[in-house]
Image (spheres, grey):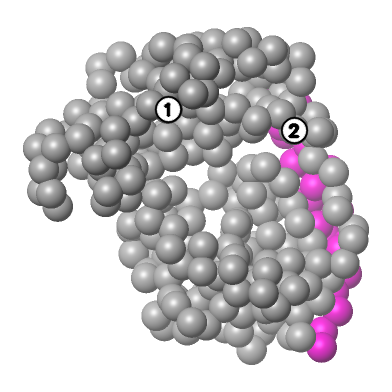
Amino acid sequence: MINHNGKILEEEEANIPVLNRGFAYGDSVFETIRVVNGKIMFWEDHYFRLMASMRIMRMEIPSSFSPEFLEKEISDIIEANELTNSPARIRFAVYRLQGGYYTPATRDIGYVISTEAMENAFYLLNEKPYEIELFKDHFVTSGLLSTIKSNNRAVNVLGSIFARENSYDNCLLLNEKKSVVEALNGNLFLVKGNTVKTPPLSDGVLNGIIRKQLINILKKTEDYQLEETSISPFELQKADELFITNVALGIQPVSRYRKKEYGNTTAKELLGKLNVKARLG
């Protein structure tokens, strides 16, 4: 079942026109949201990021789009798919309505909410080998547009194809200044001693929900010093740990980059704290 503009429809009935602007121009933004037993994880952060993304894209935000309204829209589709008592992954996509070419005929929007069942209620540490490489064919542009989740993900798609063709589990993306920005599907953290680094939003980093949660956790943890600073590719092989974060997986430790192998002690500790924060809401 799909929630299309507030109507619960069978997937085959939830049709979008071929000239939909999300398809034609990538004129769309989305949120990937984790729901556990009917509870939306980090809902306030998701809501405000979605609103910020729509403003950056100069979309008209409907007056009905209150946190309570959208929360109910998500709950309705969770219930319709009989996932109320299970972990689920939500994709909440907002697109500008059809019309115009590069210049839209309207700023009004439509939305689609889809669901997918997940296996685990809370985040588990994946300790299987996880090898990464740099993707250098194309770059992320530093700036505000790169911080939002839009449908313009060509670099991520091409990087994912490169990773699969070369048997890597993931790749790291660079910006035009040759700084490491993020992974194909999440934010990057680097650990060296008791210092934890993550690239700043000004480098073109996705404004990730789990990134924000870990930054808040680290600021309250005396054992580590957090630095939001640009990361050079040369720093990667000097690090003790590398890990990737996103809302679906939580924290994914990297085990190998080129000839360097990494531990996961910090990732394991932070994952425990992240799960506690998720439970407390």
- Say which residue label 2 marks: 118
Q: Judging from the image, what secondary structure is the residue with disc 2 in?
A: loop
Quarter holding residue 224: bottom right
The reply, left or right, for residue 229 in relation to residue 165 is left
Mark 1 or mark 2, which is nearer the start of the sequence?
A: 1
Image point (29%, 33%), residue name: 17
**Is the C terminus in the top left, top right, bottom left or bottom right quadrant?**
top right
Q: Position of residue 20 (x, y in %)?
A: 27, 38
Is residue 219 visible in this depiction of the protein? Answer: no
Amino acid under disc 1: Val
Asked where in the image residue 143 lies, by quadrant, the reply is bottom left
Q: Position of residue 127 (x, y in %)?
A: 90, 58
The crowding category of the residue bearing disc 1, from other C-alpha atoms within 10 Å (few below 14, some 14 to 19, many at least 20), is some
Query: Horizontal and vertical percent for residue 154?
Result: 43, 63
Q: Residue at x 60, y 27 (%)?
A: 115
CA gap, disc 2 and disc 1: 19 Å
Question: Would you place residue 30 above or below residue 80 in this image?
Answer: below
Amino acid on which disc 2 is placed: Met
Read off the residue under disc 1: 112
Position above or below: 141 against 13: below
* 127 over 176 or under it: above or below: above
Q: Nearer the viewer, residue 118 or 188?
A: 118
Main SS category, magenta section:
helix
Query: Can residue 68 be found in the magenta stretch?
Result: no
Asked if residue 93 lies left or right of residue 171, the reply is left
**Residue 280 included in the magenta stretch of the image:** yes
Relative horizontal placement of residue 5, taking residue 13 as reference (left or right): left
Magenta part of the protein: which range? 259-281
